[in-house]
Image (spheres, helix red, strand yellow):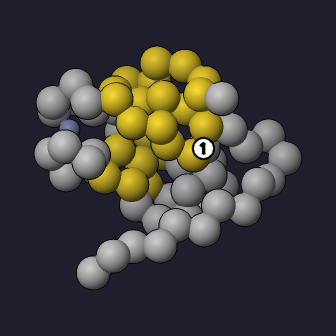
Amino acid sequence: MKKAQILIPKPGSKFQRVQCKECGEESVVYSHVSTTVTCKACGNILAEPTGSIAEINGKILGNAE
Ligand SMILES: [Zn+2]
């Protein structure tokens, strides 16, 4: 099943570069995800929706443009 991700900008929202704890792959993760984001390389969960700011499960490297 392919997950469609609809990104609705909210005040204070941003894109962050997150490094996977398992394989080191870097991904850009939206700070207010509405669906679980997994690593494209190994499938590890990178971010989980909490209703507001996503819980990031990895190393935040900084903001992405
Ligand atoms: Zn990974």
Residue holding disc 1: 31
Q: Give the percent coordinates (x, y) of residue 7.
A: 65, 61
The CB of the residue at mark 1 lies under 8 Å from ligand 1: no
Q: Residue placed at 33% from the left, 76% from the top?
A: 2
Q: Is residue 37 above or below residue 15?
A: below
Q: Is residue 3 left or right of residue 20?
A: right
- Residue 44 visible in the current orientation: no
Corner quadrant of residue 34: bottom right
On the picture, is 11 further left or further right than 45?
Answer: right
Q: Residue at x 40, y 60 (%)?
A: 36
Q: 12 and 40: which one is in front?
A: 40
Q: Position of residue 62 (x, y in %)?
A: 55, 19
Dividing the image into four equal quarters, which quarter contains ligand 1? Answer: top left
Q: Is residue 14 visible?
A: yes
Pick out the residue farthest to the top: 61
Position of 29 relative to 34 (above/below): above
**Image quarter (top left, top right, bottom left or bottom right) of the C terminus:** top right
Question: At numbered mark 1, what does the secondary structure look like: helix, strand or loop?
Answer: loop
